[in-house]
Amino acid sequence: MSSAIPLNVGITRSAGAGTVDPVGGKRVLLAEPRGYCAGVDRAVETVEKTLEKHGAPIYVRKEIVHNRHVVETLREQGVIFVDETDEVPENSVVVFSAHGVSPAVHTSAAARNLHTIDATCPLVTKVHQEAKRFARDDYDILLIGHEGHEEVEGTAGEAPDHVQLVDGPASVDKVTVRDESKVIWLSQTTLSVDETMETVQRLRERFPALQDPPSDDICYATQNRQVAVKAMAPECDLVIVVGSRNSSNSVRLVEVALNAGAKASYLVDYAREVDPAWLTDVRTVGITSGASVPEILVRGVLDMLEEHGYADVQPVTTANETLVFSLPRELRTTRR
C-alpha cells in the first residue's frame, strides 16, 4: 500500500500557466525551483565534510534534514542519529541539524565535552536572533509555527519566558499578552505563506499594534517552491510532491497544489510509492519536491512517469535561485 498522503487546506487559487496540449495528450509540468535549498545543501555537506575530517562514527542530533533518503544514506556512511545530546558518548563529535537548537542543548553538549558543529540554517539563526533581540526589549513574542517541530522548539528556547506559540489561525483566540503595545510576531521558516498571513491577520484583529518582524521569516526557498506550484497547479490533474511526511515545507506543497487548483495531489518519498491508479484519465501531472529532497528522487518519479507515457516534460520556472551559504567555520578550508 502506498505511503503517500493526500492533504487539503484552504489556500487561495492563483493564476496558472497557459495551456498547451502535448503530443499524445500526456505531459509533465516540472516546477522550478524545487528540491534542495541553500540551507539544506549546507547542512548535508556539513555532515559529509565532518565525516571526512573526523571519520565514522559521528553523531547528529535529530535528523539533519527531514528526508528519509538523505538520513538513510548518511546512516549507511557512519552517521548515528540521536534525539538528545545525552545519548552521545562524551568527547564525541555531534552535528546540530539545519532546524536549529535551543541554548539548553548547547549547554548540555558542553557539559559532556562534545565537539559540536552547528549546521543550523542561517535563515533559522536569523529568527533566533530576532527572538533574543525582542526578548531583551521585553516584548511578547508570538511565534507562528507547529507545536513539536524542531525549529519551533529551538526558537522558543531562545526566550522561553517571552515566546508564545501560535499554531495556526484557530489558536489565536487563546493568546494572551501583557502589554498590547509591545507585541511582535515571528514564524517558523517552512510554513505556508498564505496560512501564516491568515494567522497574522487574525492576530492583528486582536492586537492592532502587533509589530511585524524586521524581515520576512518565511524562507525564500519555501516561498519560491509554493509560488511555482501555484503557477502550475491549475493546469494539473495531479500534482506529485516528492518529500517526507515530517517535512513541513513538503506537506505544505501538497496543500498549496490542491488549493491552487490541482484536482489531486500526493506526497511520496520514492517513485515506487506512486500508485498507477492515480494516473487514470490524467493528462497533466505536476512534479515538485520539498526543500530537503535530492534531485535523484525527482528523477526517479520522472522515469516512472515516462514508462506510463508521460515523456513530454515542460518546466514551469518562476524564480532562479543562486544563494549559497558558507559551511561552518571549522569546515570551510575543505569545501569543494
Image (spheres, rainbow, N blue to C red):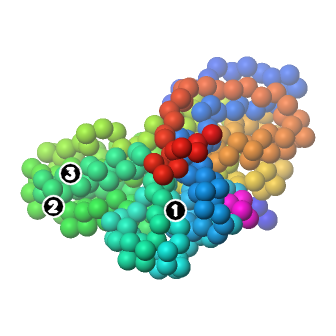
| Residue 250 vertical position relative to residue 108 in the rendered view, above or below | above
Look at the magenta stretch and give its main secondary structure: helix
Position above or below: 309 against 15 = below
Amino acid type at circle 1 is Val
User: In whole angstroms, how far apart are the C-alphas of marks 2 and 1?
Assistant: 36 Å
Q: Is residue 286 above or below residue 250?
A: above
Which of the image's four quarters has the N terminus?
bottom right
Quadrant of the image occupied by residue 291? top right
Disc 3 designates what residue? 133
Query: Magenta includes 24?
Result: no
Q: Position of residue 127 (x, y in %)?
A: 33, 49
Please give the name of the residue rendered at 26% of the width and 43% of the height, measured from the top-left corner.
213
Which residue shows up at 49% across the image and 41% down it?
326
Q: Is residue 40 left or right of residue 208?
A: right
Q: Residues within 10 Å of mark 2 (few under 14, many from 20)?
A: some
Q: Residue at 73% across / 25% down in the picture?
A: 314
Looking at the picture, how far across and down is residue 149, in whole percent?
45, 63
Q: Is residue 68 above or below residue 324?
A: below
- 257 relative to 201 in the view: left or right: right
User: Which mark, by number, is residue 177?
Assistant: 2
Residue at 57%, 68% in the rendered image = 59
Q: Which residues are magenta?
A: 72-77
**2 vs 3, front mark:** 3
Q: Sequence order check: which comes first, mark 1 or mark 3?
A: 1
Nearer mark to the viewer, of 2 and 1: 1
Front-most of 35 and 118? 118
Q: Secondary structure at mark 3?
A: helix
Q: Earlier in the sequence, mark 2 or mark 1?
A: 1
Indicate the secondary structure of the residue bearing disc 1.
strand
Q: Is residue 73 magenta?
A: yes
